[in-house]
Amino acid sequence: MSKKSSINRRSFIKKTALTTLGISIIPRHVMGKGFIAPSDKLNIAVVGAGGKGYSDMMNVWNNGASNIAAICDVDWNRAAQAFKQFPEAKQFKDYRKLLDEMSDIDAITVSTPDHTHAVITLAAMQLNKDVYVQKPLTHSIHEARVLTEAANNYKIVTQMGNQGGSGKGVQTMIDWFDSGIIGTVNHVDVWTNRPVWPQGIKTPTDKPAMLDNLDWDTWIGPAEWVDYHPLYHPFKWRGWWNFGTGALGDMGCHLMDPPYRVLGLGYPTEVESNVGSIFTQDWTPDYYPESCPPSSRTQLKFEATDKNPSQVKLNWTDGGLRPFHPELIPADHSIGDENSANGVIIMGEKGIMTCGTYGRNPKIYLNSGEIILPKNNTEESSSLPENGHHTKWVEACKAGFGSEEHKALTSSFDFAGPLTESILMGNLAIRSYNLRNETKNGFEYPGRKKLLWDGTNMKITNFEPANQFVKREYREGWKLD
């Protein structure tokens, strides 16, 4: 399929309402308020239709505002609800076949496990399809850089699924900070109660029967081959480096997003991690390199920005670990979410700004003792599902690359790419932590040190073995180009 042939219909959508008034193509204003003409609808293909993929599909469909033209999922049992919801949509198990056959789609959603985000997204962009991709944008730092550059080169309208970035809470925090209320920031704490799936465990060796209607080879995609096991699919893939990105990858794009936006951060310059272990009876720590750790702590260092004239150290903790309660915040106040399970603390010279997941419940505690809440003192979120994050992307797709609607998107790849790279830098340090060399007296762990990062060139400069985690090896027959 040529790129030229794939752009005709989308260009047609943008132009016909202004230039054509016919029988079969009728602009929306002619039919009256609330009526959506066929010429105004995007044809959207859904790749990944179970779990979060189903809600992404429903949000871009938006009660008929868009047309769900195709549904692709390697597991047709999990896709059954989507198939039932849209019986006229063409059904696929392999996204490559979908892209080969469906030349008339305008855009796709990608809501698959992390390890297949990049190959699906790049293939779609190369055919001039606009893309909505679940967080984290990619599985590796290299993939994030490739997609960011491709979105600009191919002039694609993009959005990553960290919907809090479109919420009122994050915007309130930006406005507060820009007004100087908390002053210069040099320290941020971010934490989550994830994982809520198994991590720090042995790789399974038994071979359960394959599920019916599951295309396991396509599910594995570019990852290293392993036999099917319910510890991988569904959902639990998040805890395996082969497929997922652990607690940091799962929640980092939601929780690190507010401070990243508020402070205008770029690539980190340093990273250091340590991890929790599960111990055996003789108190020897078990180490399973294929499995993400049960808990971890990571510190990222960012240089000063135009918005914040100070270096910033951002501390991340997961596995139920969280920072201690700041003195400035009353002891009976939750921090972040209502139960303090997830949250953000931004430490300024004049006070502390906090929020929960998705930038919800923003608050400021000033050194003077004053507490500042949003003006309306209500939940700081949009009335639209997921803050209208999907709807804004659909409207930007219609308006086109470079339009005002496109520029207004909060997580297009020019932002989502560097954010994802920063988060995956933490995972690089986590994976490097347990790199070990045998010695006469046991093991040494050369990766347990501060790592220095050259963001422009995507390279650790002081510990070469860590660079193996910048770019993954692809299974034979798969590549990213």
Image (spheres, rainbow, N blue to C red):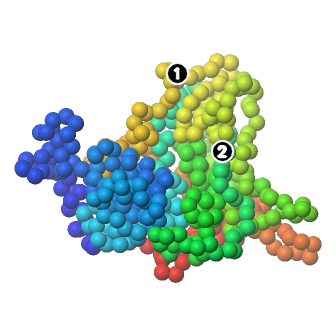
Secondary element under disc 2, as helix, strand or loop, is: loop
Sooner in the amino-acid sequence: mark 1 or mark 2 = 2
Res 16 label: none
Image-based side of 433 in relation to 130, left or right? right
Local crowd at mark 2 within 10 Å, few (<14), some, or many (≥20)? Answer: many
Q: Amino acid at mark 2?
A: Thr
User: Is 459 in front, or is 319?
Assistant: 319
Is residue 162 at all visible to an observer of this figure? yes
User: Is 324 in front, or is 228?
Assistant: 228
Locate residue 167, reporting x and y percent.
46, 36
Which residue occupies 48% across, 77% down? 478
Which residue occupies 73% across, 67% down? 202
Locate residue 238, reporting x and y percent.
60, 59
Image-based side of 475 in relation to 349, left or right? left
Locate residue 277, reporting x and y percent.
79, 58
Secondary element under disc 1, as helix, strand or loop, is: loop
The residue pinned by badge 2 equals 192
Q: Would you place residue 396 above or below residue 332 in this image?
A: below
The residue pinned by badge 1 equals 377
The image quarter containing residue 369 is top right
Locate residue 260, reporting x and y percent.
56, 44
CA gap between label 1 and label 2 equals 25 Å
Which residue occupies 78% across, 61% down? 448
Is residue 111 at all visible to an observer of this figure? no
Quadrant of the drawing holding the C terminus? bottom left
